Image (cartoon, rainbow, N blue to C red):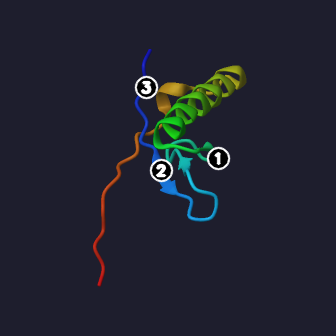
């Protein structure tokens, strides 16, 4: 079964590359030196996270989807 997750890629001004978080999966964080590497690492991290959930007997279908939007201030 395929799942789709929103990921947030934040440029890392100190080290370069990107830090990636997955809002629907608390603690699922990775990074990559390039945009493409960061996305691939996100796929790998999500896969490992879901495997861990399966091993613990936690239902994967109950992971709530994330909604990403933008807020303008100022």
Earlier residue among tags 2 and 1: 2
26 up-or-down from 55: above or below: below
Q: Is label 2 in a helix, a strand or a loop? A: strand
Front position in the image: 19 or 53: 19
Residue 56: x percent and y percent?
71, 25
**Label pair 2/1, CB-CB below 8 angstroms:** no
**Label 2 crowd bin: few (<14), some (14–19), many (20+), radius 10 Å:** some
Residue drawn at 44 percent across, 14 percent down: 1
Indicate the secondary structure of the residue bearing disc 1. Answer: loop
Residue for point 60% across, 27% down = 50
Cα distance between the residues tagged 3 and 2: 19 Å
| Distance in Å between CA atoms under marks 2 and 1 | 15 Å
Q: Quadrant of residue 15?
A: bottom right
Q: Is residue 72 above or below residue 25?
A: below
Q: How many marks?
A: 3
Question: In x, y percent, where is residue 57?
Answer: 67, 22
Measured in 3D between alpha carbons, the distance from the residue under mark 3 to the one under mark 1, in whole angstroms, is 18 Å
Q: Nearer the viewer, mark 2 or mark 1?
A: 2
Task: Describe residue 21's horizontal placement relative to residue 56 as left or right.
Answer: left
Instruction: Residue under label 3, please give it.
Output: 3
Residue extending furthest toward the top:
1
Please report the residue visible at 53 percent of the width from the left and 36 percent of the height from the top.
37
Packing grade of label 3 (10 A; few <14, some 14-19, many >=20) is few
Point out which mark residue 40 bears.
Answer: none
Q: Identify the residue at horizontal 31%, vertical 57% (top origin).
A: 69
Disc with the residue nearer the chain's start (3 vs 2): 3
Residue 27's disc number:
1
Which quadrant is the C terminus positioned in? bottom left
Q: Earlier in the sequence, mark 3 or mark 1?
A: 3
Say which of 61 and 6 sits in front.
6
SS at circle 3: loop
Residue that carries the numbered disc 2 in the rendered image = 9
């Amino acid at each position: 079964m395929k799942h789709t997750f929103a990921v947030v890629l934040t440029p890392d001004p100190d080290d370069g590359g990107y830090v990636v978080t997955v809002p629907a999966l608390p603690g699922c964080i990775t990074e990559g030196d390039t945009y493409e590497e960061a996305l691939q690492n996100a796929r790998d991290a999500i896969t490992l996270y879901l495997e861990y959930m399966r091993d613990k007997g936690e239902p994967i279908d109950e992971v709530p989807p994330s909604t990403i939007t933008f807020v303008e201030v100022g």
